[in-house]
Image: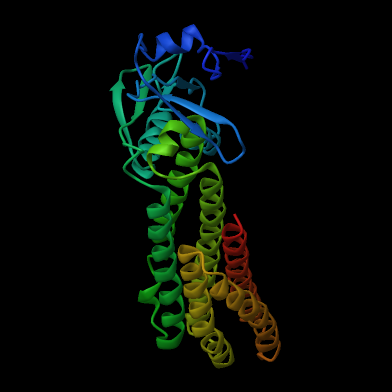
């Protein structure tokens, strides 16, 4: 934080000087222009008219002794989500096959990353994406469509007793996670670079709302996978007809609730959001009541209970999205 004193010119204009180091780093010269924008909290944002790209730091991760592969993978994901432009996996000895495989898996899963340098002791990964072109709002729309398709197929499999609808649902959930990571990453990048946030026509408040909804959609995707797994367990020649009826009874209502909650969010529609909150609360009670009446045996009891729990959580998450919609509408 650099504190500057306000001066007043003869024309009674208020004036402050710019930090010399910052001006030089932006290649600013005499008579160059800068943008001055008042923020919602009263702060002023000063940025050069012509943006000079400032090199970002390289996040280095030690892969010398990879004993816990999951822990190493989580570090790579954490560096990605934090917003680092480059990530380097290095080792004091030649990189192990395990470390190389983890890095390759990570780059294939993450959006926008490519290996740009590699030798026996290091792998350098760089973000090649233009984050002013890929907007979080569009990524969120795509994420909502992916999750909607998963929900549709889960309940369609219950109606048709056809496992093919959900046989690849875990792979589809990975795609949902990829988009969630990207939104989380962009949220951090824009927070560190207000100029870039301004360029995409967004605000930090909007970005916070985007990441909150993205996190909820990721959770809905997880519960949809749980629904599919437990449905498949019941489809293995031991399926209970009563469970079928329970699922079909609530399936369409969950699909409608999810669709409307997303519609309300995208349009910032408080009327739709209020309807979804009331409908969601009613549906949660209905799910509890419906599955209490279902007669199960020892073979189906566990799966039936988990199906009811996941269906209930999806309805509750839809209510959460609608509450965020109302909050956004009040901004």
**The C terminus appears in which quarter of the rendering?**
bottom right
Whole-percent x, y for residue 128 in the image: 30, 33
Would residue 289 appear left or right of 211 to someone viewing this image? Answer: right
Quadrant in which the N terminus appears: top right
Q: Which residue is drawn at 35% across and 75% down?
A: 164
* Percent position of residue 202, x then y: 45, 45
Q: Which of 330 and 230 is in front in this view?
A: 330
> Picture quarter containing residue 323?
bottom right
The way the protein has been coloured in the rendering is rainbow
Picture quadrant of residue 150: bottom left
Relative to 6, 121 lies left or right = left
Q: Which residue lies furthest to the front in this view?
A: 11
Q: In the picture shown, does residue 316 fall above or below 275?
A: above
Front-most of 150 and 204? 204
* Rendered location of residue 161, percent (x, y): 42, 85
Q: Can residue 171 be seen in this view?
A: no
Residue depicted at 53% across the width and 20% down the height? 13
Q: Is residue 188 above or below residue 29?
A: below
Measured along the vertical axis of the image, is residue 141 above or below residue 54?
below
Camera sees residue 206: yes
| Residue at position x 43%, y 38% in the image | 198
The mark tally for this picture is: 0
| Residue 292 appears left or right of 82 | right
- Considering depth in this image, is 160 or 287 the residue closer to the camera? 287
Residue 79 in picture, x, y percent from top left: 49, 31
- Identify the image quadrant of residue 215: bottom right
């Amino acid at each position: 934080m650099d504190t500057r004193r306000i001066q007043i010119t003869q024309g009674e204009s208020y004036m402050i000087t710019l930090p010399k180091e910052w001006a030089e780093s932006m290649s600013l010269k005499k008579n160059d222009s800068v943008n001055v924008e008042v923020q919602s909290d009263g702060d002023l944002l000063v940025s050069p008219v012509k943006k000079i790209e400032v090199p970002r730091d390289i996040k280095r991760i030690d892969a010398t002794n990879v004993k816990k592969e999951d822990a190493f993978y989580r570090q790579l994901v954490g560096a990605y989500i934090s917003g680092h432009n480059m990530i380097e996996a290095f080792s004091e000895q030649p990189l192990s096959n395990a470390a190389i495989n983890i890095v390759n898996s990570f780059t294939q899963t993450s959006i926008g990353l490519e290996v740009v340098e590699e030798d026996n002791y290091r792998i350098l990964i760089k973000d090649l994406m233009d984050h002013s072109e890929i907007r979080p709002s569009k990524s969120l729309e795509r994420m909502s469509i992916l999750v909607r398709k998963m929900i549709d197929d889960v309940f369609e499999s219950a109606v048709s007793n056809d496992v093919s609808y959900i046989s690849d649902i875990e792979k589809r959930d990975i795609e949902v996670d990829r988009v969630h990571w990207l939104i989380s990453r962009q949220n951090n990048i824009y927070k560190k670079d207000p100029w870039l946030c301004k360029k995409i026509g967004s605000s930090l408040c909007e970005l916070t709302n985007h990441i909150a909804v993205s996190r909820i959609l990721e959770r809905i995707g997880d519960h949809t996978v749980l629904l599919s797994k437990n449905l498949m367990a019941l489809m293995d020649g031991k399926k209970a007809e009563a469970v079928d009826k329970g699922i079909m009874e609530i399936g369409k209502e969950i699909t409608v609730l999810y669709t409307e909650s997303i519609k309300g969010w995208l349009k910032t529609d408080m009327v739709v959001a209020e309807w979804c909150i009331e409908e969601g609360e009613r549906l949660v009670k209905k799910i509890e009541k419906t599955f209490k009446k279902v007669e199960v045996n020892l073979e189906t009891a566990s799966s039936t209970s988990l199906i009811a729990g996941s269906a209930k959580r999806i309805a509750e998450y839809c209510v959460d999205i609608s509450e965020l919609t109302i909050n956004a509408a009040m901004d």
